[in-house]
Image (cartoon, grey):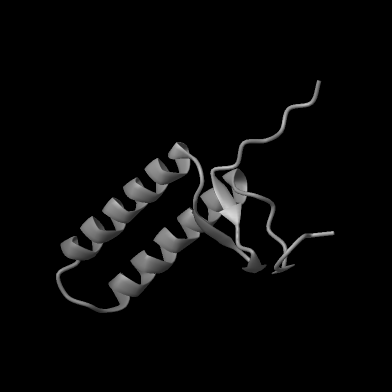
């Protein structure tokens, strides 16, 4: 008996990447990520290079989680993948 993987993030219909979460685990990850992002930006008192580095690192973390727990990424043209 084969098990179908349960993805936390569904792939976009068009283009490459992931959309909003499709499982409760994905929503938890996204909520925690968003909280850390907003909290971290508030702790960095003045906009500058630190903000940019922090946002890039946080984005890389979210992309990594989506890559591990989301549908496999590939370019999609919409409609069926056949």
Q: Position of residue 61 (x, y in %)?
A: 47, 54
The image quarter containing residue 51 is bottom left
Image quarter in which the C terminus is found: bottom right
Q: Residue at x 55, y 51 (%)?
A: 66
Q: Position of residue 28 (x, y in %)?
A: 38, 41
> For the view shown, which residue lies furthest in the right direction?
82
> For the view shown, which residue lies furthest in the top direction?
1
The image quarter containing residue 46 is bottom left
Q: Nearer the viewer, residue 70 or 80?
A: 80
Q: Residue at x 52, y 59 (%)?
A: 19
Q: Nearer the viewer, residue 78 or 7?
A: 78
Relative vertical location of residue 40 with respect to residue 77 in this rendering, above or below:
above
Q: Nearer the viewer, residue 34 or 24?
A: 24
Q: How many marks?
A: 0
Q: Position of residue 8 (x, y in %)?
A: 54, 43
Q: Residue at x 72, y 68 (%)?
A: 75
Q: Residue at x 35, y 74 (%)?
A: 52
> For the view shown, which residue lies furthest in the left direction?
45
Q: Position of residue 56 (x, y in %)?
A: 43, 67
Image position of 4 (left or right of 60)? right
> For the view shown, which residue lies furthest in the bottom direction?
48
Image position of 39 (left or right of 64)? left
Image quarter in which the N terminus is found: top right
């Amino acid at each position: 008996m084969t098990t179908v993987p349960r993805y936390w993030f569904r792939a976009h219909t068009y283009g490459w990447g992931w959309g909003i979460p499709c499982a409760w685990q994905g929503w938890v990850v996204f909520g925690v990520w968003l909280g850390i992002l907003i909290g971290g930006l508030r702790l960095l008192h003045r906009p500058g290079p630190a903000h940019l580095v922090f946002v890039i690192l946080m984005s890389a973390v979210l992309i990594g989680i989506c890559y591990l727990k989301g549908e496999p990424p590939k370019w999609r043209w919409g409609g069926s993948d056949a």
